[in-house]
Image (tube, grey):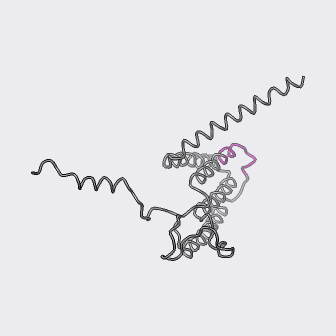
């Protein structure tokens, strides 16, 4: 009697483990495709925005989602080791260079790009599912929530930008110099090979 009732548990756990492995495999395959991942997130965010627009409700869910996304964004912009805290503690760990004579140390985020994308996409999916349950549609005056979120965003971003200026770091690589070995190799090969048309 006990063997028949316990037979379903190993099958269920084996199925859950296989599903978890398959899901992790798909995430691993998606890791190098940054543009496609963010394009997919844009589709999920647009679906959520359209759902809220047509239903004309679920503003509390949207406000909570906005606060969560703001927290993720701040973690994405912050260095892994905060220079303010490192000054207080013994300076043995890695730090950001503050002078031109300091050794170069790459910017390491507190929340890496992939985890930021994964968390924000998962949050929008959960918020989208919550819009199908009427108990989460609390009647509120949404302009106050929007105004409060904008004030919170402005104050938080101002503090983050002042932190970036004080400790001289830029969390984005758009203006930074990059080494591209392939381009340098191809240009040197072009110069060394004489053209066959000239004698």
Please tell me which residue is depicted at 57% across the width and 43% down the height of the picture: 28
In the depicted view, which residue is nearer to us: 45 or 87?
87
From the viewer's perspective, tell me whether residue 104 is left or right of residue 80: left
3 above or below 54? above
From the viewer's perspective, tell me whether residue 5 is left or right of residue 173: right
How far across and how far down the image is residue 168, in percent?
53, 73
162 above or below 135? below
Magenta-colored segment: predominant secondary structure: helix
Q: Residue furthest right?
A: 1
Please tell me which residue is depicted at 62% across the width and 36% down the height of the picture: 22
Residue 164's image quarter?
Answer: bottom right
Identify the image quadrant of the N terminus. Answer: top right
Please tell me which residue is depicted at 49% across the width and 76% down the height of the picture: 101
The boundaries of the magenta stretch are 126-137
How far across and how far down the image is residue 31, in percent?
54, 46
97 above or below 3? below
Q: Is residue 139 magenta?
A: no
How far across and how far down the image is residue 166, in percent?
56, 76
How far across and how far down the image is residue 140, in percent?
71, 57
Count all numbered tags in the image, as a single digit: 0
Q: Residue furthest left?
A: 199
Residue 175's image quarter?
Answer: bottom left
């Amino acid at each position: 009697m006990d063997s028949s009732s316990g037979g379903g548990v190993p099958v269920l756990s084996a199925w859950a483990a296989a599903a978890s492995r398959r899901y992790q495999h798909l995430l691993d395959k998606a890791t190098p495709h940054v543009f496609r991942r963010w394009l997919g997130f844009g589709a999920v965010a647009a679906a959520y925005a359209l759902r809220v627009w047509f239903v004309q409700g679920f503003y509390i869910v949207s406000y909570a989602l906005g606060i969560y996304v703001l927290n993720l964004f701040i973690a994405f912009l912050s260095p892994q080791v905060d220079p303010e805290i490192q000054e207080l503690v013994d300076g043995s760990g890695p730090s950001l260079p503050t002078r031109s004579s300091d050794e170069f140390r790459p910017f390491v985020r507190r929340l890496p790009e992939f985890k930021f994308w994964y968390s924000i996409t998962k949050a929008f999916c959960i918020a989208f599912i919550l819009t199908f349950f009427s108990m989460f549609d609390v009647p509120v005056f949404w302009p106050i929530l929007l105004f409060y979120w904008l004030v919170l965003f402005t104050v938080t971003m101002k503090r983050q930008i002042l932190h970036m200026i004080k400790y001289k770091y830029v969390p984005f690589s758009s203006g930074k110099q990059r080494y591209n070995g392939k381009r340098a190799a191809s240009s040197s090969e072009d110069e060394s090979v004489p053209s066959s048309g000239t004698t």
